[in-house]
């Protein structure tokens, strides 16, 4: 953690041989100097990452995009992008509701994207980011599903806040700028570059074994205050407990 990094919580590494580098000005758990190292933990053991389950959002995506044309200055609602189309959205693009992306696909947003809703994908699997990418090359202005109008076809979707990008197997590249990502982001890998920067209201989950990169002059703020502990779009683990009163001999 280099430069003026401020981390409100602790640092935990699963690998017992993992190492952490802190600049002199980095703050961990509100501490500076040697006191920071009391909040750095190694060898905590593997943790189970939540798995994406986009099926809860898939039925909303009813408007089909099945060609590779460039889409300029369009207003779209609840779209499903067919696999292999590799579309580019340019100019001013306004999208309300769900963007569901089939695999394989390279989807690019240039110009200004005004998105009220979220982006979800089919699972591309590990090692296929060369064919599966979401690129935000312009300015992205986003709001969560709770900001959708209280009317059809958004009535049910408005009650499912907490997720912004759920893209297992995809590379997500922010090379433009954004102000707020209103929800959790999960993908194979993330890249933040150039002057991109903003606030993510939720968790960032990177499933791949490649380096998470943030370069250029970007500032990235992660704020989980007030966000749901279990955002929609993830598989929910269930535990079955026998009810002994229902058994008889």
Image (tube, rainbow, N blue to C red):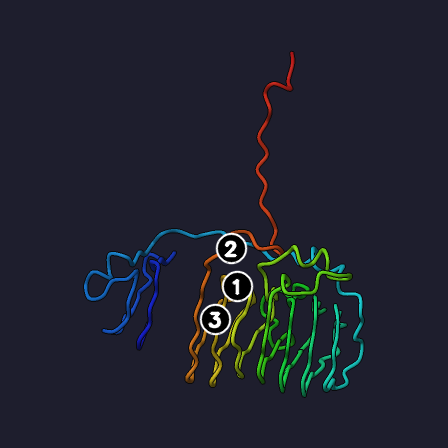
Q: CA distance from mark 1 to mark 2?
A: 8 Å
Q: CA distance from mark 2 to mark 3?
A: 22 Å
User: Which residue position is annotated with label 3?
Assistant: 199
Rate crowding at label 2 as few (under 14), some (14 to 19) or many (20 or more) other CA atoms within 10 Å: few
Q: Nearer the viewer, residue 89 or 124?
A: 89
User: Which residue position is annotated with label 1?
Assistant: 207
Instruction: State the SS at label 2.
Output: loop
Q: Nearer the viewer, residue 112 or 88?
A: 112
**Left or right of residue 203, residue 38 in this image:** left
Indicate the position of residue 173 as horizontal and vertical percent values: 55, 78
Residue at 45% over, 64% down: 223
User: Which residue position is annotated with label 2?
Assistant: 49
Disc tally is: 3
Residue at 77% over, 85% down: 69
Rate crowding at label 1 as few (under 14), some (14 to 19) or many (20 or more) other CA atoms within 10 Å: some
Residue at 77% over, 72% down: 82
């Amino acid at each position: 953690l280099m430069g003026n990094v401020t981390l409100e919580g602790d640092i935990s590494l699963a690998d017992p041989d993992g190492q952490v580098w802190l600049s002199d000005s980095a703050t961990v758990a509100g501490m500076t100097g040697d006191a920071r190292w009391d909040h750095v933990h190694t060898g905590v053991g593997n943790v189970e990452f939540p798995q994406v389950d986009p099926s809860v959002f898939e039925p909303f995506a009813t408007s089909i995009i099945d060609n590779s044309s460039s889409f300029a200055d369009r207003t779209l609602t609840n779209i499903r992008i067919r696999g292999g189309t590799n579309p580019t959205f340019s100019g001013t693009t306004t999208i309300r509701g769900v963007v569901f992306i089939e695999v394989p696909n390279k989807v690019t947003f240039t110009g200004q994207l005004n998105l009220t809703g979220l982006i979800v994908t089919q699972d591309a699997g590990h090692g296929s980011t060369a064919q599966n990418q979401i690129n935000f090359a312009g300015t992205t202005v986003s709001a969560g599903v709770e900001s959708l109008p209280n009317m059809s076809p958004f009535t049910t979707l408005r009650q499912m806040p907490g997720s912004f990008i759920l893209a297992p197997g995809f590379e997500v590249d922010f090379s433009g700028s954004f102000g707020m990502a209103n929800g959790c982001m999960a993908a194979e890998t993330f890249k933040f570059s150039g002057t991109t920067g903003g606030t993510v209201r939720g968790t960032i989950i990177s499933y791949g074994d490649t380096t998470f990169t943030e370069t250029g002059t970007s500032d990235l703020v992660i704020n989980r205050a007030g966000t749901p502990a279990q955002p929609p779009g993830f598989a929910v683990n269930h535990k079955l407990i026998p009810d002994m009163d229902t058994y008889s001999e």
